[in-house]
Image (cartoon, rainbow, N blue to C red):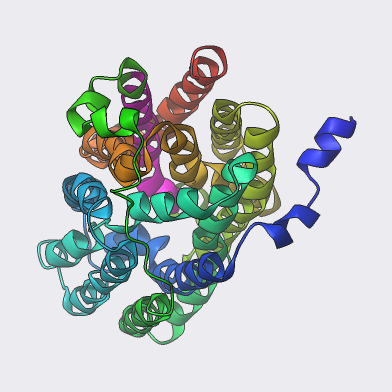
């Protein structure tokens, strides 16, 4: 009991972040707030306002995933050669055009350019490498999870606000607001200190560890395949949560936005507990616990349409948004500092490539039955959790 109490002790949060990590946290908080204004209700908007079919929604999100998979590994390579601060700034700047394209899109084909810009993921590997380099090793999982929790924390109120604005002022106002917040995130990161990857201070083993050699590591291969299945599972059902809430339970944009807020709030809160689990026990246990919470939450999500029950389900479903930082915490410390961003990028890239067609498959399943994507998510997430508990290390 004492050990679990220490897992939930929040006092350690004050010691985790230095000035630069606080600025990164703030930038990600501001940017994710803007993203959350439309990210959760986007499928609902596409289906109900633009008349986009579930399969076409799957194609749009597959486009985002293809671009993400193509940029993650490149980000990892450049994150070990160039100033990581500049890449973090560029990552937000390349998101700035996305909501502008969405503002003027009138059918699903006109939304494609925006979905492509929305898929440029330069930040995650470099963000993880920056944090791992400066974080205290004994608090690594907690630091990664807490700093990364800025993303879901930024989404706590923004889906509900976005849903309200969409219903009263229109989605164009929502998209323009996101454009402003993306810009502010990039400006905030300009205050962060530069971090150049170390090259001359490598140890002899590090000098001999080429990127090709790292790719031959069987543990990295296992983790990459595992994470590919994780991302495929999450991105198969996630784009259809909002549409299911509307189709199956009859909720409108504002209610869907509120439920989305609870999902991201849960992610921010659970980041603390899961991070402590990773530091106190084993890092894979934190990711496995997150997957268990996803599977059980989806089960409740399918069985109950009551709003209060759905609030609880959405809260714990937010654990799925922590899969990236938790996987980074498992992989990142294994790499030499000179190749850290690259090594973190490998499983993330594998995950995005594997999930490229996950939304399309989810769309096909949804047309067969709205419950099918979520049934798949329950079975797959619980199976992956069992594997992580038993075999992942």
Q: Please tell me in which quadrant of the rendered image residue 337 appears.
A: top left
Q: Is residue 281 left or right of residue 1?
A: left
Q: Quadrant of the N terminus?
A: top right
- Pick the residue in front: 19 or 202: 202
Q: Residue at x 31, y 70 (%)?
A: 92
Q: Position of residue 193 (x, y in %)?
A: 42, 72
What secondary structure characterizes most of the magenta part? Answer: helix
Q: Give the residue furthest to the top.
A: 390
Q: Is residue 344 visible?
A: yes
Q: Does the magenta segment cover residue 199?
A: no
**With respect to residue 63, does 277 lie above or below?**
above
**With respect to residue 135, does 170 lie above or below?**
below
Q: Residue at x 49, y 39 (%)?
A: 329
Q: Residue at x 51, y 69 (%)?
A: 20
**With respect to residue 161, does 84 lie above or below?**
above
Q: Position of residue 262 (x, y in %)?
A: 61, 57
Q: Does the magenta segment cover residue 236?
A: yes
Span of residues in magenta: 222-244
Q: Position of residue 209 (x, y in %)?
A: 26, 29
């Amino acid at each position: 009991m004492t050990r679990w109490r220490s897992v939930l002790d929040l006092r350690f949060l004050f010691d985790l972040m230095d000035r630069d990590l606080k600025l990164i946290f703030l930038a990600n908080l501001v940017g994710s707030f803007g993203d959350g204004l439309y990210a959760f209700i986007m499928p609902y908007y596409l289906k109900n306002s633009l008349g986009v079919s579930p399969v076409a929604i799957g194609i749009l999100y597959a486009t985002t995933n293809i671009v993400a998979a193509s940029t993650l590994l490149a980000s990892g390579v450049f994150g070990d050669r160039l100033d990581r601060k500049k890449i973090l700034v560029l990552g937000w700047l390349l998101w700035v055009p996305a909501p502008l394209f969405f503002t003027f899109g009138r059918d699903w084909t006109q939304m494609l350019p925006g979905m492509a810009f929305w898929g440029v993921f330069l930040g995650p590997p470099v963000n993880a490498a920056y944090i791992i380099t400066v974080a205290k090793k004994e608090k690594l999982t907690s630091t990664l999870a807490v700093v990364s929790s800025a993303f879901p924390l930024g989404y706590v109120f923004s889906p509900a606000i976005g849903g309200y604005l969409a219903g009263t002022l229109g989605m164009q106002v929502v998209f323009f607001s996101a454009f402003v917040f993306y810009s502010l995130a990039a400006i905030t990161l300009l205050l962060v200190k530069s971090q150049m990857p170390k090259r001359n201070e490598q140890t002899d083993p590090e000098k001999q560890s080429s990127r090709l050699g790292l790719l031959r590591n069987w543990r990295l291969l296992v983790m990459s395949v595992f994470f590919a299945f994780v991302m495929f599972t999450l991105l198969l059902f996630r784009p259809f949560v909002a549409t299911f809430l509307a189709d199956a339970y009859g909720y409108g944009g504002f209610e869907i936005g509120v439920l989305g807020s609870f999902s991201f709030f849960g992610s921010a809160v659970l980041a603390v507990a899961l991070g402590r689990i990773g530091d106190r026990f084993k890092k894979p246990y934190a990711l496995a616990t997150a997957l268990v919470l996803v599977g059980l939450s989806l089960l409740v999500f399918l069985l109950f349409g009551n709003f209060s029950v759905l609030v609880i389900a959405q809260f714990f479903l937010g654990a799925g948004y922590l899969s990236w930082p938790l996987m980074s915490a498992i992989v990142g410390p294994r790499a030499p500092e000179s190749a850290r961003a690259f090594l973190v990028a490998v499983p993330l890239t594998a995950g995005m490539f594997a999930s490229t067609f996950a939304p399309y498959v989810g769309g096909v399943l949804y047309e067969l039955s709205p419950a099918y994507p979520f049934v798949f998510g329950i079975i797959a997430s619980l199976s992956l959790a069992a594997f992580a508990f038993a075999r992942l290390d």
